[in-house]
Amino acid sequence: MPKVLLKTLVAHCDKILRTAKIKDFDGAANGLQAENRGTVSRIAATVDASLATVKRAIAARADLLIVHHGLFWSVRQPWTGKHYELFRLLVENNLAVYSSHLPLDFHPKLGNNVILCVALGLKNLHPFLLKEGQYYGLQSRAGILRSVLASRLHRATGEEPLIIPGGSETCERIGVITGGAGDFLRNAAGEGVDTFITGEGPHWTYALAEELGINVLYGGHYATETFGVKALATALSRRFHLPWTFIDYPTGL
């Protein structure tokens, strides 16, 4: 079985994802989050780094786990109880963890945003929703019935979307940000879209969408963010001739 240096894989990912150049939320810690003993022979990919997915990666005999939501969003100390169990499993089973949040969302080919847009049949994509000097999503002009767009989203994610029918039945200008971007609803409407697709949002966005006259399609935070880790793992597998597997561990959220 081929082996590749971990540092080679990390350097490649950091370069193509522009990890050092993209601002992210506190706690994201993009890049290598846990080392192994230096080589990789099998890759696993999953959305969330957790005790459950780490156990499944170990069962799949992976020595590198690629994730979208990494290990350090919340406090991981002291290293006792389940925290200790997680880190013990990583060390004892030689499992490295590489995490990419917004850099993977934003990538023009491997990103969650672009892959979901393609799956929805959206074309002529343009940057969408500028915040703090960077665009968080993509937008497209189209004439698609809201019901048809919802069916496409269902087919793309495998989950029935939650629909807030605040706007017209025909979607003319559609904005897409995967994950939990419901808080950005007012920003999205301010950029002129009549339909906003994301993963999840707060309860109050239902009334706000009606007031703003905008359709909102919530496709699920997890379900809209499986695309990027799969695409990145596939790209690494092809370049470095390494086997990979996807660990599907849906949260239903």
Image (cartoon, helix red, strand yellow):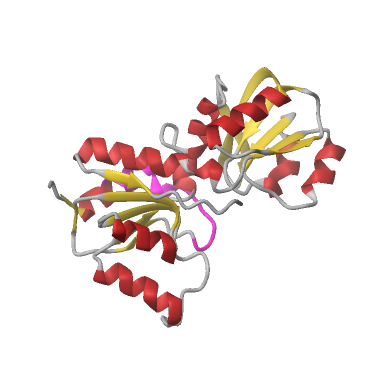
In the rendered image of this protein, does residue 218 appear above or below residue 109?
below
Residue positioned 33% across, 57% down in the render: 57
Residue farthest toward the left in the current orientation of the protein:
1
Q: Position of residue 150 (x, y in %)?
A: 66, 30
- Please indicate whether residue 88 sits to the left or right of residue 29 in the image: left
Q: Is residue 23 above or below residue 169?
A: below
- In the picture, measured across the screen, residue 16 lies left or right of residue 76, that is left
Measuring from the top left, give residue 89's x and y in whole percent: 32, 70
Q: Is residue 39 left or right of residue 96?
A: left
What residue appears at the point 55 percent right and 22 percent down from the top-left corner?
121
The residue at the point 32 percent across, 50 percent down is: 44
Query: What's the magenta region?
Result: 12-27
Which residue lies most toward the top here? 143
The vertical placement of 216 against 51, above or below, is above
Does the magenta segment cover residue 194? no
Task: Please state the horizontal and vertical placement of residue 26, each as a whole percent of the image.
Answer: 53, 62
Residue at image position (32%, 38%) is 234
Seen as rendered, the residue at the extreme right is 211
Query: Which sits in the foreground, 2 or 195?
Result: 2
